[in-house]
Amino acid sequence: MTRRKVLLAVNDREHEVWVTPSDSLLDVLHDELGMADVRYGCGEGVCGTCTVLLDGEPVNGCLLLAVQAEGRQVTTLRGLMGAGEAMHPLQECFLRRGAAQCGFCTPGMVLTAFDLVRRCGRPTREEIRYALVGNLCRCTGYTKILDAVEEYAALAGPGGAPGAVAR
Amino acid sequence: MVSAAFDYVAVDSYDEAVQRLVEHGEDAKVIAGGQSLVPMLNLRLARPAVLIDINGADRREPAVENGMLRVPALTRHRTLLEHPLVRRHCPLLAGAVRHVGNVRVRNRGTLGGSLAHADPTGEIGACSLAVNAQVVVRGPGGARTIPARELFVTYLTTALAAEEIITDVLIPVAGPRQGWSFLEMVRRTSDFAIVGVAARVELDQQADVIAVAEVALAGVADRVVLAAPGLLTGLAGRAPAAAGLASAAAGIAASVDPASDVHASGGYRRRLVQVLTARALRGAFDMARGVAA
């Protein structure tokens, strides 16, 4: 099928890429643009490792076509980080609480939890569990992940988290 | 898992989408949220030559008109969950959507897409039966309305013609003396339902007795199904005692013949229908009376 040129806005930078219509956003971010923080897990929208924010909302990178992301703002984990790759406060909570083991699920966990806290302010543990149900951790470190998100929500306080993402 | 190659066209209106469907015939597939279609593409269970992207075809929000809640087909699950009009006028749907997929799926998946996909375990399909929704579709000959109760034909198959697209879902607004409950059994939250039950109860205007009770089931057949109305008429005019609900639930369980698969045996599914239906009817009745479940 014919390739077409697409302008993708990722983490506040524009990228011109040639894609075929069947290329997923995940394919393009990971394979074409070399973004290692967006990962192929299941290809069915179940595992959450390819999570990106589309205009600020978590979506499956594997189930979105790259052509559908044109004109939208895409944010990967790195887009949450500060100048000089300073860690986002939520990442610091993950580190402090030992919530990353192999790290493969971590970008998806962080982006999903970031969205939850931005929306809810101070989610209950049950709400955190529910929001993260679509992010699988095969090291099964869920308890520490919940602890980290809880700590971040307490730090961020009501009214949302620091390090707001461009929408 | 990589999908087979396909071409892609994004349209700005439903009329253009219908034109494209007419042009490409059976080689085309409509994509909205893509949360069921794209996994099927990735698994090569579907190999369309062209995808017609309708995400830009409609920007309307849910609205109430003439006693009906009109929900545009492109409404995302997350909006169903959160929109004040949906929560107020079709709380069953807003409640059931909680069980659909995960947060990312709900951010993209759409009401019309769920109905058109016609998964026999679909929560939204079951709700559309329980609330007696009307599905508005657009085709080459213009618009027509299909009752949800006539929409589902068999696995992943609806009564839509190949060139038709769902544009709206019309739902009678819930009255003040109605209650609802949606219950399902899953091994893990966000999985496909083993069995799902949508129950809706309307009370008599004066007394705390049941005027109408309806139950729809997911996961028990080749499509979502409405319990035969005759199985629930015994409840009408009564304040249901536990025995009445249990016998209605047992009747409904006896009326289905679910298949066995890797997730559950048919016998277990039938047992789930009985237990969940009794609970859902009780929950819906108590809610209608204003008693906390």
Image (cartoon, helix red, strand yellow):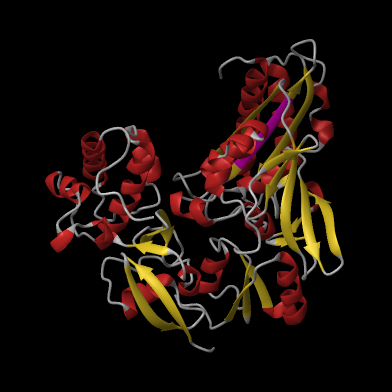
Camera-nearest residue between B170 and B200: B170
Residue reaching furthest bottom? A2
Would you place residue A48 above or below residue B132 in this image?
Answer: below
Report the number of discs.
0
> Is residue B200 in the magenta section?
yes
Q: Residue at x 39, y 44 (%)?
A: A131
> Is residue A23 in the magenta section?
no
Can the viewer see residue B256? no
Would you place residue A81 above or below residue B291 in this image?
Answer: below
Q: Residue at x 75, y 81 (%)?
A: B23
Can the viewer see residue A77? yes
Quarter of the image that includes the N terminus of chain B: bottom left
Write down the quadrant of residue A55 in the picture: bottom left
Write down the quadrant of residue B174 in the picture: top right
Relative to residue A164, is residue B95 drawn left or right? right
Task: Give the x, y percent position of residue B219.
Answer: 63, 48
Q: Which is the main secondary structure of the residues drawn in magenta?
A: strand
Relative to residue B233, is residue B89 drawn left or right? left
Magenta-tinted stretch: B196-201
Residue reaching furthest top? B207
Relative to residue B119, is residue A14 drawn left or right? left
Camera-nearest residue between B40 and A149: A149
Would you place residue B110 above or below residue B247 in this image?
Answer: below
Task: Give the x, y percent position of residue B292.
Answer: 56, 17
Task: Give the x, y percent position of residue A18.
Answer: 42, 84
Task: Give the x, y percent position of residue A143.
Answer: 24, 41
Camera-nearest residue between B279 and A77: A77
Quarter of the image that includes the C terminus of chain B: top right
